[in-house]
Amino acid sequence: MNTLTMDTLIAGLHNVLFGFVFYYPMIMSWLWIFGGLFFYLRREARRPKLPTFEKIEGCSILIPCFNEEENVRETIRYALATRYPDFDVIAINDGSRDRTGEILDELARNEPRLRVVHLASNQGKAIALRSGAISSQHEYLICIDGDALLHPDTVSWMMSHLTSGPRVGAVTGNPRILNRTTLLAKIQVGEFSSIIGLIKRAQRTYGRVFTVSGAIAGFRRTALHRIGYWSDDMITEDIDISWRLQMDFWDVRYEAEALCYLYMPETLRGLWKQRLRWSQGGIEVLIRHSLDLFSWKQRRFWGVAIEYVLSVLWAYGMMSVLLLFILGFFIDLPDFWMVDRITPQWCGLLLGLTCLIQFVLSLWMDRRYERGRILRNYFWVIWYPLLYWVLSMLTTVVAVPKTLLKEKGKRARWTSPDRGIHPHDIPQER
């Protein structure tokens, strides 16, 4: 291969790398916008205030708890305030080392709808959920985290999906953030309103949901039994259960009215640990099910899988661009690989405009769940790309080798997350 051909090849690789890094987020944003708008106009714009039922089916609210003594009273109180006619609450104490078990037993003595399952030692969230599912007498299970606060009508909205057809295996809810006192928390409020909700709507429109929410999700027990319940060796059991259900051809839905309030990290360390766990969980699931995706029967899942693979490649591509930019200060790089600037040029401005459009449209869709705080959330979410794109890039780059080096078959157990600064105000009923 002569020098001219090599130079042409390198120049082509350079153009592909930079084009992919800058145009991939823009293309995905427009796909999310169109898919999210279609979902909203078709399923959310005109709907009754509350769902109606021809027949009331019973359900269990499962709450796995590990060292939740600070939150569990409030979580149980909100769960018991559910307005759905037929439900019980099953709290699973997964070998907590604090007073969680004592508090749950105390609450159960005064509340007949609450049952407590004690595990002798910490087994992990997957085992805790499986224990709760086996203990339930109902076909339908609503699963929430030990610090999550259910809106009174959430169970009704989730049950309207689960009982609507025999192939509905799961429905994911709409988590909302309670703590909003720091910059990190305020940006996350905007993220959940304008990024996560929009992506869930778009994925539902295009056929498959990447993951149900670990904080609020409903399941049909028959579907769980068919696939063997939650995997105890996956770091994110919610992503894994979502993929396995859909690969078994169960329908997974998204319900924006199924609100659940929770606390999120407000320190960089806590946020890093959370997002690294999410990234590692996605890569674990992709590796485990990669061969299954080649089946023609799984073609409806290809869009979600390809998008995730591209997001991983984007992280490494963006990291390469940043490294080339930094190396340019210390090494005389060839012209092909010289990165003069990473500040926005015309393509960066186009991407920024796309993000602003995406943010305002998605916040408009979510306005009813944020009490109309469009402008307030919009001010904070415009900082999202600066912080969270960098965080997503770094966690993905770290998660890939961490996943590949993970000990196979090792059970995933709990760690107490950073839940930020709890506010004094509790969400009011709408």
Image (cartoon, helix red, strand yellow):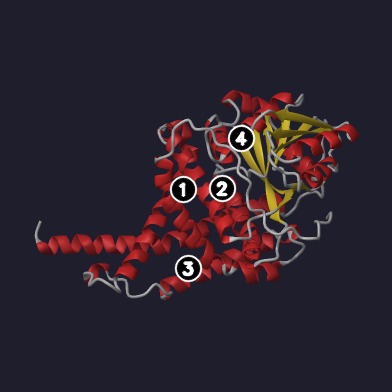
Labels 4 and 3: the sequence-earlier one: 4
Label drawn at residue 203: 2
Q: How many marks?
A: 4
Q: Distance between the residues labelled 1 and 4?
A: 26 Å
Label drawn at residue 124: 4
State which mark lies toward you, 1 or 3: 1
Q: How far apart are marks 4 and 2 (CA)?
A: 29 Å
**Type of the residue with mark 1:** Tyr
Q: Is residue 327 left or right of residue 315?
A: left
Q: How far apart are marks 4 and 3 (CA)?
A: 41 Å
Label drawn at residue 308: 1
Mark 2 neighbour class, 10 Å CA radius: few under 14, some 14 to 19, many 20 or more: many
Q: Position of residue 291 (x, y in %)?
A: 40, 33
Q: Distance between the residues labelled 3 and 2?
A: 21 Å
**Type of the residue with mark 4:** Gly
Helix, strand or loop under label 4: loop
Give the quarter of the image for residue 245: top right
Q: Distance between the residues labelled 1 and 3?
A: 20 Å
Q: Where is residue 290 in the image (x, y as percent from the top left)?
A: 42, 36
Labels 4 and 2: the sequence-earlier one: 4
State which mark lies toward you, 4 or 2: 4
Does the residue at mark 3 contact the one at mark 2 (Cβ under 8 Å)? no
Mark 4 neighbour class, 10 Å CA radius: few under 14, some 14 to 19, many 20 or more: many
Label drawn at residue 25: none
**Residue 26 visible to the viewer:** yes
Q: Distance between the residues labelled 2 and 1?
A: 12 Å
Residue shown at 65% from the left, 59% from the top: 193
List the residue tagged with mark 3.
Answer: 351
Helix, strand or loop under label 2: helix
Q: Position of residue 50 (x, y in %)?
A: 82, 46
State which mark lies toward you, 1 or 4: 4
Labels 2 and 1: the sequence-earlier one: 2
